[in-house]
Structure formats: structure tokens, C-alpha cells
Amino acid sequence: MACVNDCDAPAPAPAPAPAVGAPPATLKILVAGGFGAGKTTFVGAVSEIEPLSTEELLSGLGAGSDPLNGVEEKTTTTVALDFGRITLDERHVLYLFGTPGQHRFWFLWEELCAGALGAVVLADTRRLADCFPAVDFFERRRIAFIVAVNEFDGGHRYGPEEVREAVGIGPEVPVVRCDARLASSGTGALAALVRHLLCTSTASSSSSESGEPP
């Protein structure tokens, strides 16, 4: 009778390779607003890495196009972008892109907004009208945003509804207060944006399922 020895037995199936965790999802967020609204300070305060900044010293050449009324102490300006990163959890990482505030660099906004999920528009109550172009930019491109009122020392304190009315945004856009110098305050503004994005996504999904226009 034929026998089957160990050599004739089928080889055991190889053990499954240990699962490798998927890389975290990266979420692109813009930090926008007018000239001197605190975008670079905001990104630097919340970033867990040394932020990339493209600040240059202000010169008299730009005084005509970028007046310093209300921000006379400002000595530098962003000429391209600010970049920072903040890890929400093991699955989500925020990449923060601060936009340049000076008018002559606004052509960069189109490139920076590619792939962005949402934006924080910083408003300076000393120069509130300076945030209008950013609000208009995101509204036209249907990019969700919140308005974060950066409360500068000595600046007038307006209530969220006063700011909402002055900027001309609807009740669906959150308006929050923040101090761009404080990481906890900036993180709170980002959390408000993430909640707004989730609510917007849920509302859009519900509209699609019901057949209603978003």
C-alpha cells in the first residue's frame, strides 16, 4: 500500500500578511481674508510643524495699492502662501494653506483653491470690508466657508449677527470669534469649519436622495 510521507503532503498555505494601515486622508483647508487679517499668525499658531511662510518686508512701493490704514504696525506680507499641518486623528490630517492678502497676488487663489474642501475667512473688524472679496470668491465657487472674526487688541467687538449682516452672508454660514495668536482658538475655528462641512455634506446627500436640487 502506498504511503504518503511528509514530502508528499501539500505545503501549508502561507500565513496572511499583517494588515498595513491605510495612510491618513489629507484634507485641504484654506485660510483667507484681507491684507493684515492674521492669516500667517493663524496658520503658525495651529500648525504642528514649523510652518512654511513666504513673508517679505513691506516697502513703500506697495503703499498705493495696499494702504496700511488700521494696520500701521504691519511690516511684512505674504507674497505666495503659508502652509501648515494639523493632525486631527490617525485617519485625518488637515493641510492648511494661507492665501496672500494683497490684491496683486490674488491670481494665486485659483491655484490654491484646487482640491480645497473649505475655508476659514478671517475678518478684521478694523477693516471689515477687506474680507468681502474672499467671501465672494468662495461663494462663486461654491466652496463652503466660515467667517472667523479675529479679535485684535483694541479693536471694536461686534456680535456674530452684526458681522453677518455687515458681510452679507446667510444664516447657514457660521460666524465665530477667534484670536489668531492662540492655538486653541484657531483649532476651535477649524473645528467649526469641519462641523459646517459635515452638515453641508449631509444636507447635500439628503437632497440627492430625495431628488431635490441642492
Image (cartoon, grey):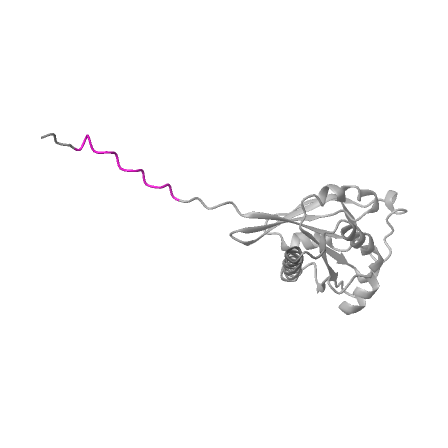
Residue 209: x and y, percent? 63, 56
For this view, does 169 lie left or right of residue 45?
A: right
The spot of residue 38 in percent (x, y) is 74, 55
- Quarter of image, res 157: bottom right
Residue 131 sits above or below residue 22 on the image: below
As rendered, which of 166 and 85 lies closer to the eye? 166
Q: Residue furthest front?
A: 211
Q: Seen from this angle, which residue lies furthest left?
A: 1
Q: Residue at x 83, y 60 (%)?
A: 128
Q: Is residue 188 visible?
A: yes
The image quadrant where one finds the C terminus is bottom right
Question: Along the line of sight, which residue is nearer the eye, 34 or 200?
Answer: 200
Task: Name the residue nearer the viewer: 161 or 95.
Answer: 161
Q: Quadrant of residue 131?
A: bottom right
- Region rendered in magenta: 6-18
From the viewer's side, name the closer residue of 160 and 201: 201
Q: Is residue 178 above or below residue 68?
A: below
Where 201 sits versus 107, above or below?
Answer: below
Q: Residue at x 83, y 46 (%)?
A: 103
Instruction: Identify the main secondary structure in magenta.
Output: loop
Q: Residue furthest right?
A: 64
| Rendered residue at 70%/62% (across/down) | 179
Which residue lies at the image location 75% right of the left edge and 57% below the top edge? 122
Asked if residue 155 shows in the view, the reply is: no
The quadrant the N terminus occupies is top left
Q: Position of residue 170 (x, y in %)?
A: 78, 63
Whether residue 8 is in magenta: the answer is yes
* Number of on-image labels: 0
